[in-house]
Image: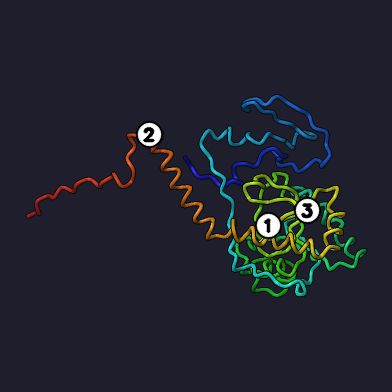
Amino acid sequence: PQVRQGVAVDVTHDQFDVAGAGVEGPHAEPEEHPGAGVRGGWIRRIGRGHLVEAEESYWTDQMKIPTRFFPVGIEDSHYTPRPENEKIYDVSLIASIGNFYPLRLAISKEIEDLGKEHGWNVLLRRAPNDPDYRRDISKIHADAELRKEWLVGTDYAEALTRSKIFIFGSSIFRYPVAKYLEGLMSECLVMADRPFHAEDLHLKDGFNYVEITRDNWKEKLEYYLDDDQLRETIARHGRETAIKYHTNKVRAAEFIQMLRRSNIDQDHQDPHRRSHSDIRPPERRMDPPSI
């Protein structure tokens, strides 16, 4: 069996842009079509046909090979929690923003005005839009002006640890993006939509993060900023979850175990298959020295 990263495989049961033409709109009427070639499934075209919604097993069925879920890990030493009195941002949105991320886009359009209305300190920053800077963030760290515009690397981690709430959305694919785990590790309250593999990631709404939608994010944001004790409790549970399940050390151990199980599964499927320990290099024939 091959090991595949979960976010690259199980990104179904949601909308994706098959034509690269952008999102037609969040409330476009769906048009259902039979799921040709999809085992026991269906495909929905939304709007003018650019967006397609497929059932959860669509991608894995098409791959026709065993798959494993393997999410990103987090370096916990980069995210040192701060006490509540050192958290200077009431809410932060630090992310790529656009039609690919409809929830983030909706939040970004209103959150600053909402912050002014309630007296919140809001941090809104977009991800670098220049490919050169995306590939080499050291260029940003070397430029004082760019560091004010874009928060990356250690600046990004520090901003999270100084935030009471980290709010964002997954994407139209509902990817379990690294932001979920980065926010948990920072011990700020993660508010986001429910991603695929939420159970595998040990995400529990109201326990270690808060699930939001386009319709209720403002109400929930106000509620959790008003209730300090509840917010801090959920944030603490988030940090504990991240330490227990999502550090790089934990992920490395899981990967090794995954490889071992894959070898065991292959041995069971093919009893004549030799293990690595059974394989010996061929004997080397010693030719007589040339004269």
Secondary structure of the residue carrying tag 2 is loop
Can residue 223 be seen in the rendering of this structure? Answer: yes
Q: Quadrant of residue 226?
A: bottom right
- Residue 112 position, x and y percent, is 86, 62
Is residue 266 depicted above or below 219 in this figure? above
Left or right? Give the position of 152 relative to 267: right
Question: Among all residues in the image, which is located at the extreme left?
Answer: 291
Q: How many marks?
A: 3
Q: Earlier in the sequence, mark 3 or mark 2?
A: 3
Q: Which residue is mark 3?
A: 104
- Between marks 3 and 2 in the image, the one whose residue lies nearer the viewer: 2
User: Which image quarter is the C terminus in?
Assistant: bottom left
Which residue corresponds to mark 2? 270
Q: Quadrant of residue 9?
A: top right
Residue at 41% of width from left, 43% of height from top? 263
Give left or right: position of 253 versus 83: left
- 187 and 145: which one is in front? 187
C-alpha separation, residue under disc 1 versus residue under disc 3: 12 Å
* Residue marked by disc 1: 179
Q: Callout 3: helix, strand or loop?
A: helix
* 72 in relation to 58, above or below: below
Q: Position of residue 151 (x, y in %)?
A: 70, 67
Nearer-N-terminus badge (2/1) = 1
The answer to whether any part of residue 126 appears in the image is no
- Three-letter amino acid code at the position of disc 3: Arg
How many residues crowd mark 1 within 10 Å: few (<14), some (14–19), many (20+)?
A: many
